[in-house]
């Protein structure tokens, strides 16, 4: 009989310690999951900001024509994929969308031509490498960057 009481006490103590350990774990790890959620949200925001950084360098800046031509080359893959449009308005009167034509509110995107004449000096689409262009970005209603526009001063 003493063996049964002793075994019951040991089983009860083990059960009590197990429940206490589970309670401690819950109390310790519950705040850390909230911190992990906050860290994940911050990481997502940082990732989005870094993804947009390659476009944001053109927001409200004045750049040279050679930088405009470099931007046309740099974003050719994304433009061909329908992710971005580039508008170039030159001093000769050319107002051309490359890769994709984007509406003024940024919500409508339609494929258009590639920049084939920007280096031809006899063409109105010619971009003077030493000309100065005012750059800005166009976002859609979801605040996604849809286009970059370059307007020659």
Image (cartoon, rainbow, N blue to C red):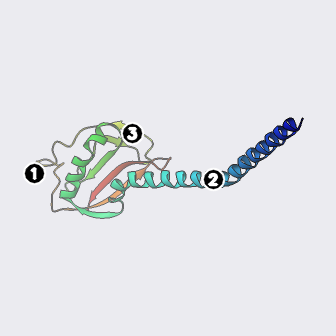
The disc at residue 121 is: 1
Residue beneath disc 2: 34
Badge 3 marks a residue whose secondary structure is strand
Residue at horizontal 45 percent and vertical 42 percent from the top: 107
Q: Position of residue 36 (x, y in %)?
A: 57, 52
- Name the one closer to the observer, 106 or 38: 38
- 100 in relation to 43, above or below: above
Q: Are marks 2 and 1 in contact (CB under 8 Å)?
A: no
Q: Classify mark 1: residues with Cα within 10 Å, few (<14), some (14-19) or many (20+).
A: few
Of the pair 87 and 6, the residue shown nearer to us:
6
- Dividing the picture into quadrants, the one containing residue 65 is bottom left
As helix, strand or loop, the secondary structure at mark 2 comes to: helix
**Circle 3 residue:** 109
**Is residue 99 in view from this perspective?**
no
In the rendering, at what x and y percent does residue 49 appear? 43, 55
Side of 22 where 11 appears, left or right: right
- Extreme residue toward the front, this view: 2
N-terminal of the pair, mark 2 or mark 1, is: 2
Q: In which quadrant of the rendered view does residue 32 lie? A: bottom right
Q: Residue furthest right?
A: 1
């Amino acid at each position: 009989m003493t063996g049964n009481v002793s075994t019951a006490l040991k089983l009860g103590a083990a059960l009590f310690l197990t429940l206490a350990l589970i309670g401690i774990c819950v109390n310790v790890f519950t705040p850390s999951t909230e911190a992990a959620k906050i860290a994940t949200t911050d990481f997502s925001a940082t990732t989005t900001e870094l993804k947009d950084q390659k476009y944001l360098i053109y927001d409200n800046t004045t750049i040279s024509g050679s930088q405009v031509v470099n931007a046309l080359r740099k974003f050719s893959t994304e433009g061909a994929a329908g992710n971005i449009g580039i508008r170039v308005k030159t001093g000769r009167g050319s107002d051309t969308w490359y890769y994709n034509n984007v509406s003024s509110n940024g919500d409508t995107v339609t494929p258009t031509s590639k920049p084939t004449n920007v280096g031809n000096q006899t063409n109105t689409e010619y971009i003077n490498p030493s000309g100065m262009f005012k750059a800005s970005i166009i976002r859609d209603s979801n605040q996604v960057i849809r286009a970059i526009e370059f307007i020659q001063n």
